[in-house]
Amino acid sequence: MLFGGPHQSRPSFRRAGVVVGDRVFAVRAWQTALYVVAAMEVRQIVDYDQEGTELADEDYPKLSHWRPLKSGCISEVVLGAPGSPIRFDKPLPGDRLEQLTFTSRRGERKLKYVEDGRLLRALSLQGIYRLAPSSADLLTRHLTDQEPGA
């Protein structure tokens, strides 16, 4: 499950254009590095108040753990098939970091604030952005240990 809402601190997946079938990557910026934490394919996006009716019976007990989020302006839940394992142990190599490209209606853009393979600021990662297909493939290979030469 991933959670979204109406505020910048918890952006809306729907407003960002995320649809069923999209692959979503969770990332973490830490000490000038970018970590690909996990990935999940979107199966459904539901209103927070209705996600209990959409979950499989065995997943419903997990939901009670997330109840406090309702007071934190959460309005939607992204449900997906079991995604990748969650990991915090492997930063994206600097040369790969420099290759990351995002795409939008205005065109493509590289990840900002990258210098000498180091992420100097995480500002351009705050939010939900569509990756260029080659960058999505790059993150998938990194997350699943299928990088060239690995």
Image (cartoon, rainbow, N blue to C red):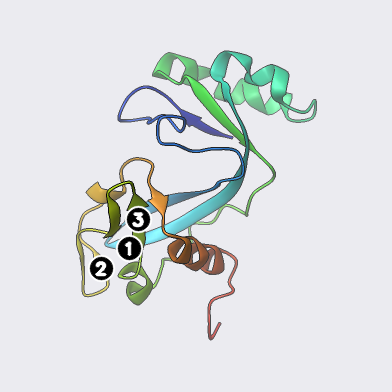
| Amino acid at circle 2 | Arg
Nearest the viewer among 147 and 37 is 147
Give the residue type at disc 3: Phe
User: Which residue is the site of mark 3?
Assistant: 102
Pointer 3 local density, CA inside 10 Å: few below 14, some 14–19, many at least 20: some
In the image: residue 5, left or right of residue 87: left
Q: Check disc 2 and report its element: helix, strand or loop.
A: strand
Asked if the residues shown at circle 1 and circle 2 are in contact, with their CB atoms under 8 angstroms apart, the answer is: yes
Q: Secondary structure at mark 3?
A: strand
Q: Quadrant of residue 107?
A: bottom left
Return the x and y of residue 2 as percentages of the image width and height: 53, 35
**SS class of the residue under badge 1?**
strand
Q: Nearer the viewer, mark 2 or mark 3?
A: 3
Whether residue 98 sits left or right of residue 24 in the image: it is left
Q: Quadrant of the N terminus?
A: top right
Determine which residue is flagged by label 1.
33
Q: Which circle marks residue 119 in the picture? A: none
Q: Residues within 10 Å of mark 1 (few under 14, many from 20)?
A: many
Residue occupying the point 27% across, 49% down: 106
Does 71 sit above or below residue 110? Answer: above
CA gap between label 2 and label 3 equals: 18 Å
User: Cβ–Cβ below 8 Å for labels 1 and 3?
Assistant: no
Residue to which mark 2 is pinned: 118
Q: Residue at x 56, y 51 (%)?
A: 39
Earlier in the chain: of badge 1 and badge 3, it is 1
- Assess disc 2: are there few (<14), some (14-19) or many (≥20) residues with their C-alpha within 10 Å of its C-alpha: some
